[in-house]
Image: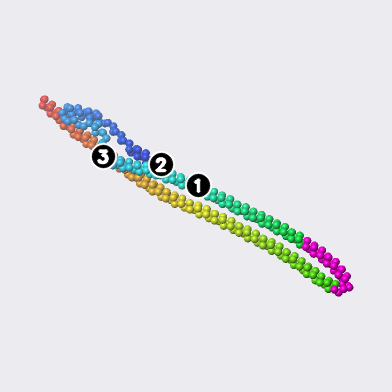
């Protein structure tokens, strides 16, 4: 508030100029005073007061003393207003420092939330790697199961070959025996049943693998969706908390600034009122000085007229003495 500081300095300069003692009037009318003294000695009349005594500055009146006291009071009020403005300036600087601290804390909080979000994403990536490892494990298990199935298949094929050999032998023997024919039909039925069981086992194995794969993909998708939802919820909550904190601090600072602005406007109004009052007092003082000067000039004029009226009276006694001598 440099303009208020300049106003206070200008007011102090004006007060210093007003408080300066008035200059003494020049001594005048010495010659006229001497002539009047000589004539008084000759005529035997009373001595008239000298002009030097009349030119002395008159003592201040009661009104001037009151005005001087009022001026000093106004000066003290201006000094108090100056100190109040300085205190408000320091408080405003403190509020600005607090606002800077709040901005730094908000930046640190946002950095913390970014680090936390990055950590969450790292956790998600780690879980994804774990799921990939599980998929690889399942693929290994699938490969192992397929290997076991191939081994069983080969074993069954070997068994089938053996059965075919047996069947061929049985066919040879069935040519002779009907029992062997019945046995052949039973063996064929068993082979068909085994083949059907192999087909069923293969279909069941494929279905199980597909079901496990679909379940794993569904669980992976659900987990990713849940993780993303949680991360988004945490981000939204953190942003809302930060915005709420910033809005609360901003509103608080706005209220404090509004109160300080109102106090400052009140001080400005008071300073203006005091300045106007000081101008009024100065105008009254100038008016009193003019009136005092007019009174002094009027008194001086009256004394001059009285001197002029005394001159004929002093000349007449001299003429009467000359007539008596003649």
Left or right: 101 in relation to 17: right
Q: Nearer the viewer, mark 2 or mark 1?
A: 1
Residue stretch in magenta: 151-179
Q: Main secondary structure of the magenta part?
A: helix
Q: Earlier in the sequence, mark 3 or mark 1?
A: 3
Quick one: SS at disc 1?
A: helix
Bin the neighbour count of mark 2 within 10 Å (Cα to Cα): few under 14, some 14-19, many 20 and up: few
Residue ID for mark 3: 61
Residue at the location (26% across, 31% down)?
28
Q: Which quadrant would residue 72 be assigned to in this image?
A: top left
Residue ID for mark 1: 101
Q: Earlier in the sequence, mark 2 or mark 1?
A: 2
Can residue 280 be seen?
yes
Left or right: 100 in relation to 66: right
Magenta highlight on residue 153 = yes
Pick whichever, 36 or 253, lies toward us.
Answer: 253
């Amino acid at each position: 508030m440099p303009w208020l500081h300049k106003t206070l300095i200008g007011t102090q300069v004006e007060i210093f100029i007003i408080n300066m003692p008035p200059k003494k009037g020049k001594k005048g009318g010495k010659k006229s005073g001497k002539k009047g003294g000589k004539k008084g000695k000759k005529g035997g009349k009373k001595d008239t007061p000298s002009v030097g005594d009349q030119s002395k500055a008159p003592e201040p009146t009661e009104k001037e003393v009151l005005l001087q006291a009022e001026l000093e009071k106004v000066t003290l009020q201006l000094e108090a207003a100056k100190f109040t403005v300085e205190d408000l300036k320091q408080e405003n600087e403190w509020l600005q420092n607090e606002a800077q601290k709040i901005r730094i804390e908000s930046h640190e909080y946002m950095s913390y939330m970014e680090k936390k979000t990055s950590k969450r994403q790292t956790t998600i990536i780690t879980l994804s790697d774990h799921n990939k490892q599980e998929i690889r494990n399942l693929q290994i298990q699938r490969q192992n199961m397929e290997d076991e199935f191939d081994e069983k298949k080969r074993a069954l094929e070997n068994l089938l070959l053996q059965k075919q050999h047996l069947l061929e032998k049985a066919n040879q023997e069935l040519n002779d025996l009907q029992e062997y024919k019945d046995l052949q039909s039973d063996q064929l039925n068993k082979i068909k049943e085994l083949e059907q069981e192999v087909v069923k086992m293969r279909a069941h194995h494929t279905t199980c693998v597909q079901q496990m794969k679909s379940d794993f993909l569904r669980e992976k998708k659900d987990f990713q969706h849940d993780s993303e939802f949680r991360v988004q919820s945490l981000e939204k909550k953190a942003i809302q908390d930060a915005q709420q904190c910033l809005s609360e601090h901003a509103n608080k600072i706005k209220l404090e600034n509004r109160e300080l602005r109102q106090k400052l406007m009140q001080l400005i109004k008071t300073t203006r009122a005091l300045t106007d009052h000081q101008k009024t007092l100065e105008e009254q003082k100038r008016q009193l000085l003019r009136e005092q000067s007019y009174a002094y000039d009027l008194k001086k004029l009256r004394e001059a007229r009285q001197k002029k009226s005394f001159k004929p009276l002093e000349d007449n006694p001299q003429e009467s003495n000359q007539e008596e001598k003649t």
